[in-house]
Image: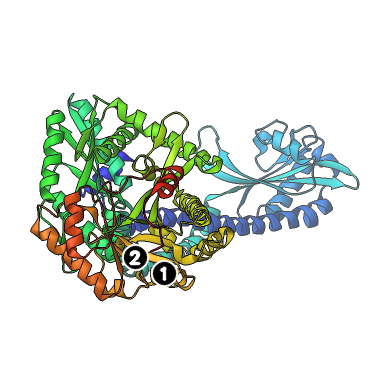
Amino acid sequence: MISRLHRFERGQTRAPRLVLRFAIFTAVGLSVASVAIFLLVKGFVTSQARDAVEENTRFVAQAVLPQKLTPEDFAGPPTAARRGQLDRLFHTQVMIDDVERASLYGLEGRVAFSTAHAIVGQRTAESVDAQASLRGTKIRTVIQQENIPGARKRTVLKQYVPIWFGNQPAGVFVTTRNYAPIASAVRATFLPIAFVLEGLLLALFVSLLPVLRRVTRQMDAHLGEIEHQALHDSLTGLPNRVLFHDRIGVTLATARRTAGRAAVLLLDLDRFKEINDALGHASGDELLQQLSTRLVRALRETDTIARLGGDEFGIVMRVDGAADVRDAAARIHGALEQPFEIGGLRFEVGASIGGVLFPDDATDPDTLVRFADAAMYAAKRNRSGIELYSPAFDDASRESLAMGGELRRALDEGAIIAHYQPKVEIESGRIVGAEALVRWNHPDRGLVLPGAFLPTVQKTGLMSQLTTCVLRLAVTQAAEWDRLGFPLGIAINVDADALLDPAFPAEVAAALAEVGLPSDRLTLEITETSIMADPIHAGRVAEELAAIGVRLSIDDFGTGYSSLGHLTALPLSELKIDRSFVTRLGDSSTDLTIVRTILDLGASLDLSVVAEGIESDATRTILHQLGCGLAQGYAFGAAVTAAELTAALLSAPVEAAVAT
């Protein structure tokens, strides 16, 4: 497998030579057919000749001899007078149709009479066959070599005919003919027929060659294309996973022969899903194509780079040590420094790279790939760009796998809880709402923040179940505050899957109805990239949510790739300014301009605007001066339990909180 794929990639294999194969197989077939025809025709003609000879012998044995012979003629040598009679009889009526010798054998196998007088009274080579013939009633024909001392060897045709008188066998009548004339007649008959049939087969073969040659050329092209597609990625033209594993095997084999070293690297793009969802799959494909070109240029010709699927790439190369791996990673990161331009937009793309060394870390391809994958995820977690494999990474991978099982149990057993961060009026500091933020109350690790387990939630397909859990926790708590006299708004974050789920609006309506919470108290915070994953379907779900009275808010506004056309087409109620702009307000005039623009946009579109990430009084003052009315951040309070926020509400020296 390895050598075959390697030869193909180096141009050392060719599509099957069908014309040559056809010629060889046809030649063999014609040879077999020729032999078959030869034997068939020869057998047929020979059979016809034998039948004719047998017919003559049968006539003599049935019509002539019974009338002229007596049982005594088979009992022993005849008298001189009787021999003379038999000589005349045999020469006039038996020795015809090329019969050279005729004999009469008795029951005990001795010659009673023969036209060859010398053998009379003897047992001859024919005696055994003669006695065997007595057990039947049919003529027995034998073609065999005859060896007579002093004479040339020749082929003869002998026929043995049992002679009966009444119900008693008397003996055997034996004739001997020279087979050469019969064989000559057979050849003269069957050879022309065989040549005609062979000529027809040859003519058919020659007539098919031009057609087959055209078909072969077409099949050569198709087979080459099929084999190339089987080993290469259709989007980028790079080797695919199958060929990548083959190349690893070839590289390792070379490294073993030379006592050298090799490396396997896995590369995964950062934020590719976000870009793909925001700009569409066509733009994502174009990004991968541009990226592939850059990667090929950044690496050596002797290195292999393959697309393994999605935004994951694999690299196998000969190296002297870890320094070469880090150098290759540096060249790759350097190739990504220049922004990509797609659809009129320019943006930067980073990559996480994991590397593993042969034979330092592992010696077989599967283990090398698995270790490189663990290193790549470590690079993602650490945001380091490149990580070389360490056994500790395996522990992290096993921990992630175990975490998936624990999360399922946590969702089933109620270990997923919500903390609530107040949303306040900047001018008065009054609490007017809260954002529900998910937490995991782990039995051993205590309170686990979402950053530590949300990647596992996404990987294990539990996001929908988690969203439902947080939704029910939030509306239940909001209904409880409502009963206490605090009609606060409640907000939760939802991902793209929920926004694209046609059943989600009904699920939200059912949760609100179950606790008796007015629908306008619930705000669903969505990101721009969630909307841009599929604007049409997202718009339909958003319309249904708005129809039941739920408020929609754009979270982290200003950091995505959405267009104002898409945003204004949605039934939005709120914009949340991303904390990255808010935290730098006092130091960056650019961020100040962005925040002012978002506030003006919100006012123009009649949308509430919330600033998040306020951590100082100075930032609060600037936002108040800019006209921002609502905010979240540590300056007003961190996320706390429902009981702690309830206590804060009860002790607040302000008027009863009102919903936004």
Q: CA distance from mark 2 to mark 1?
A: 9 Å
Within the image, what quadrant is residue 144 found in? top right
Residue 373's place in the image compared with 358, above or below, is: below
Kindly identify the residue that appears in the image at 14 percent across and 35 percent down.
Answer: 326
Q: Amino acid at mark 1?
A: Ala
Q: Nearer the viewer, mark 2 or mark 1?
A: 1
Label drawn at residue 542: 1
Q: Find out whether the residues at labels 2 and 1 contact each other: C-beta distance under 8 Å.
A: yes
| Closest to the observer, 235 or 460 | 460
SS class of the residue under badge 1?
helix
Lateral position of residue 284 relative to residue 62, left or right? left
Report the quarter where the C terminus lies.
bottom left
| Closest to the observer, 562 or 317 | 562
Residue bearing the label numbered 2: 531
| Closest to the observer, 189 or 467 | 467
Mark 2, Cα crowd under 10 Å, few <14 / some 14-19 / many 20+, is: many
Q: Amino acid at mark 2?
A: Ile
| Closest to the observer, 263 or 612 | 612
- Farthest residue to the right: give it: 167
Which x, y percent locates residue 324?
12, 33
Report the quarter where the N terminus lies.
top left
Lateral position of residue 41 relative to residue 449, left or right? right
Number of residue marks: 2
Kindly identify the residue that appears in the image at 10 percent across and 47 percent down.
Answer: 334
**Looking at the image, is mark 2 or mark 1 earlier in the sequence?**
2
Which x, y percent locates residue 26?
40, 57
Which x, y percent locates residue 29?
44, 55
